[in-house]
Amino acid sequence: MTATAAPARPVGLVGTVDELLGRLVSMRSLALLRILVGPVTLLHLRPFVADALAGRIYRDAFYEPYASWYPELPRPLYGAVLAVGVVAAVAMSVGFCTRVATGATFAVVAYNLFLSTTHLHSNRAYLVIVLAALAVAPCGRELSVDGWLRERRGEPPLDPRAPGWPLWLLRFEAAVVYGASGVSKLVDPDWFGGTVTWHRVVQVRDRLDASPLPGWAVTLLADRSFHTVGAKLIVITELFIAIGLWWRATRYAAVWVAVCFHVAIEVSASVQVFSYLAIAVLVIWAVPSTRDRVVAIDPANPRHRRLARVIGPLDWLARFRVVDGPSGGPVSLTDRDGGVKVGPAAVARVLSRLPLTAWFALPTLALPAARSGLTASSRR
Amino acid sequence: MVALIVIVQLALVVRGYRSAHKEFAFQMFPESSTWRAEIVRVTTDGDRVPVTQPWAGYRWDELVRGRGLHHPELRHHADAGLDNQLAFLDAALDYVAENTPRDDETRYLEATVTTWHNTDAPEVTVLRSDDRSDAT
């Protein structure tokens, strides 16, 4: 028999950190990230697989091993490893034998990355980090075939919560990506002063002239003073994302800016899987608790039913419980802090918390109509 | 364990300011620098033969692909910075020197590299592969 006791209050900084790392939190965001990272991994592996299918592998041309002792496989085995990576990425994404599949995906991508210095790019390093976090976190208990099979067998679902340290660690790594990039540009006078971006545009001016961009836009992009300001905005944007993601007051703004930032990068530069990966990773900044917001609808109201139908399939982070409210009443949203929004303000807030509609709905929260509607907590 | 990972990650970020390949340092789009290289094979009798000419059944653009090294004679953007680009080129020279067994006349490969760091004036650097021990 094991005696249990109420958890002791953490003492000191180490105790507080220890408690934070071990605190049980929802793994829902990592489960969602697992699904999204599967296709990103396939996209990453595609050129290696295409080459292997054409009979070429990395060592048929210049490559540079990181270490002489690093194991290099015979050609057929290397192809088989890539095939395992593809199968594992699919299994990871659908959540079949999730723990093994995620570990295998990480192992293949990491092994391949470290085969040669020529394989290394920042987006691939970031992918390895993300896969490592997914491999150590029990992120296959929900949104997975494993969970579905368990349910079919009539077994009780596993606790979707787990110690939060993989999530906190991944948040740290995600912030480092933006922070390190921003600081490196901040301390480089050529970058911060706009020389680098301006010069880069000048180098590709012929491509810009041939692009569908209007003449005034090309002229603006090639203007040096535009870059004097623009470069600083880029640096501030990266640093704002790195820092803003940590605080609740700025988190949604940082997520919104990050999406714009990555879309801009994707259309203006060739960055392999970086944009897709970085946007996918933004889901980890959701508060790791589930079903702690209540949406009350009038089931007789067709518009309310439509909202409930939207929430059902789009609430990937499991943030809402939809309940029947009073007949004839407005939609209401009770937040986790007890604050209540009603009517359009509630709808805007709900849509701003769904991953697929968040980017469009978040700016509406700045409108006076969305900011009003606070009823319960402020009047209590 | 978590503290160790945090420390290692921060160390890698700091290391990125000195390292050519900047592994896990996340210094993206660092420079607008460009480079171009004239690469020759220096033979045992002292001839300097451009690698744009095939030799002993080898072609530079088949031996060296990717990372902007395919056609070094053309001016390219050093997309991960000049240090990174020169490190790759240096390693590529060694790779070609070591992986061309049918070539029995080349002593070493030499690259005369012109680099433009952002908008600075050009600089010239000479890189040389290891001596090929099997050249006759």
Image (cartoon, rainbow, N blue to C red):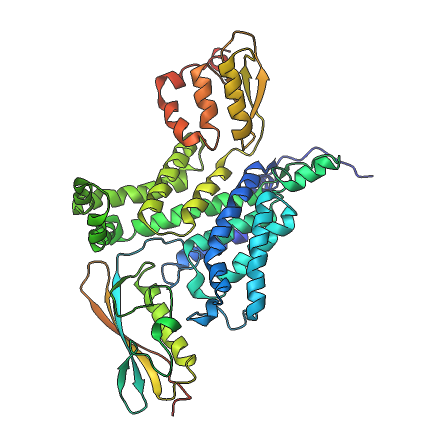
Q: Percent from the top left, x then y, of residue A353?
A: 48, 28
**Residue A64 in the image: above or below residue B27:** below
Quarter of the figure with residue B23: bottom left
Quadrant of the snapshot with the N terminus of chain A: top right
**Residue B122 in the image: above or below residue A84:** below
Judging depth in this view, the residue of B116 and B134 nearest the camera is B134
Is residue A107 visible in this depiction of the protein?
no
Is residue B89 visible in this depiction of the protein?
yes
Left or right, residue B136 beside residue A149: left
Judging depth in this view, the residue of B45 and A342 nearest the camera is B45
Judging depth in this view, the residue of A167 and A49 nearest the camera is A49
Residue at the spot x=39%, y=23% of the render?
A: A365
Residue at the spot x=44%, y=65% of the render?
A: A117
Judging depth in this view, the residue of A8 and A27 nearest the camera is A27
**Residue A16 in the image: above or below residue B67:** above
How many marks the image carries: the answer is 0
Left or right, residue A271 beside residue A35: left
Left or right, residue B104 beside residue A151: left
